[in-house]
Image (cartoon, grey):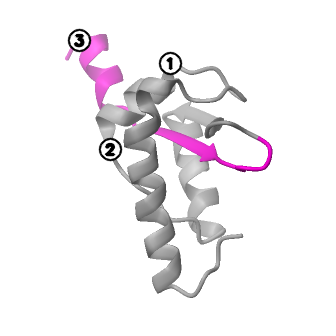
Amino acid sequence: MSEENNLEKRQQAIALTYDMAKNAAPKVVAKGTGHLAEQILAAAHKNAVPVYQNKTLTGMLMAIDLDREIPPELYRVVAEVLAYVYRIDQRLGNRLK
């Protein structure tokens, strides 16, 4: 198996935050591949943060520097993800604040 194919199969994870009072758009606050991705996901699960899986979107978000807002071309798709997360949170009793 080539190294390129091996890299494609490694797990990736992104963490976003969005505070409408402070930011114009969601920001990338954590990202990683392999073991770091596993740590990001473990932290999400430990803190009951919903996880949304989309390899294409994750790949696009991996190109964004940490602590930077997402670009306008990703607003719509990230808004759909955030809406999904908020719906899940509503069903689970408003745990996200």
Inter-mark Cα distance, 1 to 3 = 22 Å
**Residue 22 x, y percent position in the rendering:** 80, 43
Which label sits in the foreground, 3 or 2?
Answer: 2
Query: Are there few (<14), some (14-19), or many (20+) residues within 10 Å of tag 2?
Result: few
Mark 3 Cα within 10 Å, few/some/many (few <14, many 20+)? few
Q: What residue span does the magenta drawing correspond to?
A: 1-22
Q: Position of residue 68 (x, y in %)?
A: 68, 26
- Determine which residue is flagged by label 3: 2
**In the image, residue 6 above or below residue 20:** above
**Residue, disc 1:** 63
Q: Position of residue 47 (x, y in %)?
A: 66, 68
- Near-viewer residue (18 or 54): 18
Q: Amino acid at mark 2?
A: Asn
Q: What residue is at 29 percent from the left and 12 percent from the top?
A: 4
- Residue 85 drawn in magenta: no
Query: Which quadrant of the view contains residue 88?
Result: bottom left
The local secondary structure at tag 1 comes to loop
Q: For the residue labelled by badge 3, is the local secondary structure a helix, a strand or a loop?
A: loop
Disc 2 on helix, strand or loop? loop
The residue under the point 19% across, 17% down is 1
Q: Is residue 92 left or right of residue 23?
A: left
Which mark is drawn over residue 54? 2
